[in-house]
Image (cartoon, helix red, strand yellow):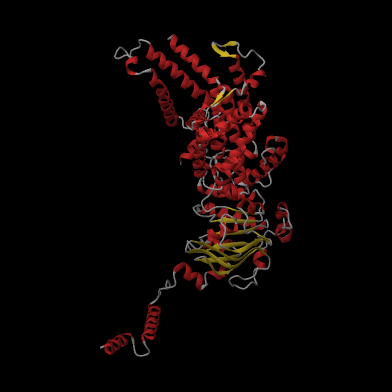
Amino acid sequence: MGELLDAFQLGVRAMFAYQAVFFALLAIGLNLHFGYTGLLNFGQIAFAMVGGYGIAISVAQWDLPFWVGVVVGLGAAVILALLLGLPTLRLRADYLAIVTIATAEALRLLFRSVGSTEVTGSTEGLFDFNSSFFTWCPWSVSGRFDILGTRWRGSELWVITIGWSIVLLSCLLVWALMRSPWGRVLRAVREDEDAARALGKNVYAFKMQSLVLGGIFGALGGMVYAVGTGSQNPDQYQNANTFLAYGALILGGAARVLGPVIGAMLLWFIIAFSDSALAALVSGDNSFFGLFEWGDLLSTTDIAYIRFIIIGLGLMLLMIFRPQGILGDRREVMLDAR
Amino acid sequence: MPADQPPGATAASGLSKAPAATTASAPPARLAQAALRDVPWEIGVAKPDPAIVVDGVTRTFGGLTAVSVDHLEVQRGGITGLIGPNGAGKTTLFNLLTGFDQPNSGTWSFDGRSLGRLSPHQVARLGVVRTFQLTKALSRLTVLQNMLLGAKDQRGEGFFRSLVPGVWRKQEAANTEKALDLLARFKLDAKKDDFAGTLSGGQRKLLEMARALMSDPKVVMLDEPMAGVNPALTQSLLGHVKDLREQGMTVIFVEHDMDVVRDISDWVVVMAAGRVIAEGPPESISQNQAVVDAYLGAHHDAPLTVEEEDRVLAEAEAAIAREHGPSGDVLDSETTRKGTQR
């Protein structure tokens, strides 16, 4: 029982760790794209990558100040969004999906290619770009802090403080936008582009604005992740993360301001909790009602896969019994089913 | 804007043009009808005060010519019905006029301003709004939100301005008031907070029309507004369409129900196979041979009485005989030809 409690504690800790911030920001961007505007962006991780590398390359390779790195990262995300959107947003939704998924993979391969070693560090990655970020930390970076039974290093605490502040501000921004006429047009575009056009709305411009803003959220997520890990490697930005972020979004409820945040936290709770709970189950002498030993059935290496199976099962059950997600409006989702 | 009236003034000017309308209990003078009285019933005829002028517009899809209109003028302030059998190119013409499709050639203008190469939202902003054959209610927006979307020149639709509610709140309140008025007129006010997706088909038609009116349009183009609507609702929709004319708007609508067309239109344009085959006031259309042929086929007029049947048969035989040669009746010509061949 004590092990289960420990696992629970680790799960709670993971809800607030910088990985959760990362996914929350990815999902906030996707929420804007997919939840509100109906854009199928399957390469959100590419925005995170240009954001993270914006800092890493600027600071580690070009010796620029940290804040310049942030500006570079955000600028790169805007440019990426424009490049993706210009040719595809006039076309049907599928084309954006195709282009984004290909771009995410192509960019990762480009960043890890030998030819780009001088800039991106290739597979060796980049280090030492977040030290100035920690000099701004008001408390001791190397100190240890116990908060509600969870242990945090000072540096981690600083990253997540800034990270969750960004999440909070992003949510405020999305909330402010979505209650305005601008947000109403976005939702109209999601429902029917032609109807929005017939009412005099420049659909292309609205889709582009949405793509850029959502991409900026993704880039901010990548920055938090880069600063949190302290190293940059292209393979951290596998496109599977985009789909995990979609999972978080759907879990929390799409087209809800807090949906992606709740979803990301819950996703990380499930991952961390099942990870340590299964590990405890396998390592101890636990048997299934005396029939067989869990340790004989599963090895510690299986756990990494099993937790994703659990997430998959959870999402399936959610889709069957609560298709609107945790925060969603059932009436709204049911309209879609017709 | 080349238009001489601001959009808000259309209703008022419509009234000032017809002062009798406000005093008399009789239906307002159908100005367009009066203006069109002396216009000859010819294809491409010039109207006294055209709002929309179409010149040489063609649109082909591969080998199929969907639309090929040489010249067409639409009278301002009137209801122009656009009819024709399925596949006549009515909806394609609508799409071309509203920028949803671009023609292969030709020019068309609204209030003297060319609409060529304008995108749909630009056309809409000029005051030409349309509805769709398959209603496009924005399902997961409430009825009221649907209405508010229709309003023009919203300050809160700019990205940065939307973040400052003070900039758009007042306009939003005014728009909401207008939307509620319109919803009350269309008897949808009880539904204002429901998702548009929960409305019935007929209510969606009403909503789409009401939403189009939010922008104070000058020209309203209705694509089959009565399709799939029950007869009771048809009457109320008809009333709304007539209201539009009384407010000085120009209405173009596609419809299949001839009773409806006859009832409300001032002028009817008939299309078939992409061309305008006839135009004139509604009463002229049912007598027009080209129209009858287009709808029913050239040989639809099968004889109704025995005498007629005999006469038609005789005519047909004579015609065949003429084709086969100058001499004798049909049978004779057959035999003589066989004879000569041997």
- Quadrant for residue A31, please give it: top right
Decide if residue B131 is on the left or right side of residue B331: right
Q: Does residue B342 lie above or below B210 as drawn?
A: below
- Residue at image location 66% in from the left, 39% down from the top: B159
**Residue sitting nearer the eye, A283 or A185:** A283
Q: Quadrant of the N terminus of chain A?
A: top left
- Residue at image location 67% in from the left, 15% down from the top: A138
- Residue at image location 63% in from the left, 23% down from the top: A165
Residue A116 percent coordinates (x, y): 55, 34
Can you see residue B189?
no
Q: Does residue B180 lie above or below A295 as drawn?
A: below
Decide if residue A229 is on the left or right side of residue B19: left
**Residue sitting nearer the eye, B333 or A134:** A134
Residue A180 percent coordinates (x, y): 65, 37
**Residue sitting nearer the eye, A11 or B18:** A11
- Quadrant for residue A46, please give it: top right
Residue B106 percent coordinates (x, y): 60, 64
